[in-house]
């Protein structure tokens, strides 16, 4: 379980860094006006609007991955395995410590700490 948690943390950190980088690479909505007047966006690798499409889709995928890793880490952090039911299927109830300690010394004749001494 610890390896799975570590893997989720690594994927979460990498997706967070990817989202940060992609958001910083994207142009704002005001950049479209500059592209219309020949700022050189049409000669890019993805075409006139292809880079915005690619970057926004990649950002959405990384954000979904980040969300899924966060949800998974939350569920794993709250996971507490249930106690074993034992061989017979019934929960093993340990005897209370005070009752076991009080009955054991009385059976073999020793005195209980804190109890008055009984003369023999």
Image (cartoon, helix red, strand yellow):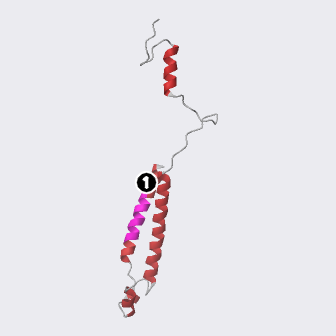
Would you say the magenta stretch is mainly helix, strand or loop? Answer: helix
Position of 50 relative to 15 (above/below): below
Lateral position of residue 90 relative to residue 33, left or right: right
Most distant residue in the bottom direction:
37
Q: Nearer the viewer, residue 50 or 113?
A: 113
Q: How many marks?
A: 1
Assign a secondary structure to mark 1: helix
Position of 16 relative to 24 (above/below): above
x then y, percent, for residue 115: 44, 17
Most distant residue in the top direction:
120
Q: Which residue is mark 1?
A: 6
In the rendered image, residue 12 lying in the magenta stretch gets the answer: yes
Most distant residue in the right direction:
88
Identify the residue at image location x=39%, y=73%: 22
x then y, percent, for residue 108: 50, 13
x then y, percent, for residue 86: 60, 35
In the rendered image, residue 44 lying in the magenta stretch gets the answer: no
Identify the residue at image location x=53%, y=45%: 81
Position of 34 relative to 105 (above/below): below
Q: Which residues are magenta?
A: 9-20
Q: Nearer the viewer, residue 76 or 54?
A: 76
Q: Nearer the viewer, residue 55 or 74?
A: 74
Characterize the local packing of mark 1: few (<14), some (14-19) or many (20 or more) Cα atoms within 10 angstroms: few
Instruction: Find residue 90 and report its image quarter.
Output: top right
Instruction: Find residue 89 and report its image quarter.
Output: top right
Identify the residue at image location x=39%, y=74%: 23
Identify the residue at image location x=45%, y=56%: 7
């Amino acid at each position: 379980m610890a390896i799975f948690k570590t893997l989720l943390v690594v994927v979460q950190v990498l997706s967070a860094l990817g989202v940060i980088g992609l958001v910083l690479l994207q142009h704002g909505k005001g950049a479209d006006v500059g592209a219309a007047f020949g700022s050189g966006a049409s000669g890019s690798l993805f075409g006139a609007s292809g880079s915005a499409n690619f970057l926004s889709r990649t950002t959405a995928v990384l954000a979904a991955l980040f969300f899924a890793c966060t949800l998974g880490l939350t569920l794993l952090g709250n996971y507490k395995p249930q106690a074993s039911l034992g061989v017979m299927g019934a929960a093993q109830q340990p005897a209370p410590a005070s009752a076991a300690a009080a009955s054991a010394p009385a059976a073999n004749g020793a005195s209980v700490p804190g109890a008055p001494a009984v003369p023999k």
